Image (cartoon, rainbow, N blue to C red):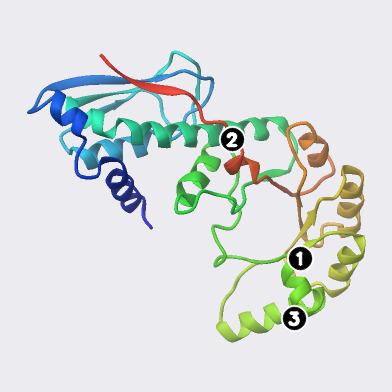
Amino acid sequence: MTIDEIIVKALAEDIGDGDHTTLSTMPGYSSGTARLIIKDNGVLCGVDLAEKIFMAVDPSTRINILIQDGREIKSGDIAFTVTGNKGSILSAERLVLNFMQRLSGIATATSKAVKLIEGLKTKILDTRKTTPLLRELEKYAVRTGGGVNHRMGLYDMVMIKDNHIDYAGGIAEAINAVHDYLKRSGKFLKIEVEVRNFDELQHVLDHGQVDRIMLDNFTVENMKKAVTLIEGRFETEASGGINEHNLRAYAETGVDFISMGALTHQIKSLDMSLKAV
């Protein structure tokens, strides 16, 4: 689903057969201006999306962007002003705020994680733990906050996880099956495999034929040991049980990537409001 399609469906969900409060209190055309006021400190995300929403409601609406996506913001800042039909501004208000508050929350959480490992080689990744149909927007927010997108979906990378391994009958069997499938289908996809302990890690090291190893729920001490064992033969990714308190310790093990599902599913939306001038 494209962003334009998301906007159309979201507006239909909210407005239905009409914004009756606005239609009854403000019939006809009356021009007005409103300001998007920031009420939290963080990183801004969603300004361009907001403009698309206002334009979808009323193409005659004009937005003056004062702060671009990716900029640090503080309470009291004005992100943009919007001018046009008062009724159109009010009808778009809630959808604009819903998106901007959530996306800015994701960008802020990501930025905080990135700053915690500043100076180290490790990159912060998101996951597929996103809101259904809003993945493109939420992953954009991760990039805005300085993070890196993992795969977009099940289609653009092979990730062999615990259930795949168990169903396939083992790590070697799963990896071999993937290579057979890719050869038959003519696809060229990177292969990542998840390991849960050192025994599984050794199986992968012995077998090879993957691009990245995900070390799932390893302690910091075991992560350092695992990275040393891998010796740069494969990309490494840490996942599971990682938070702001232990993030830098994991990054200091030399792991290439740290994936954090919390970036998109455990964030606090940034507070902001749209106020008439």
Left or right of 22: which side holds 180? right
Residue at label 2? 267
Which one is in front in this view, the residue at disc 2 or the one at disc 3?
A: 2
| First in sequence: mark 3 vs mark 1 | 1
Residue shown at the point (82%, 45%) measured from the top left: 254
Q: Residue at x 25, y 41 (%)?
A: 15
Tell me if mark 1 has few (under 14), some (14-19) or many (20+) residues whose alpha carbon lies within 10 angstroms of its own.
some
Residue matched to label 1: 162
Rounded to the nearest whole Å, what is the CA distance between mark 2 and mark 1?
27 Å
Which of the two discs, 2 and 1, labels the residue nearer the N terminus? 1
Percent x, y for residue 50? 34, 35
Name the amino acid type tagged 1.
Asp
The secondary element bearing badge 3 is classed as: helix
Question: Split into 4 quadrants, where in the image is the C terminus?
Answer: top left
Callout 2 amino acid: Ile
Q: Is residue 230 above or below residue 219?
A: below
Q: Earlier in the sequence, mark 2 or mark 3?
A: 3
- Residue 179 in percent (x, y) is at 69, 80
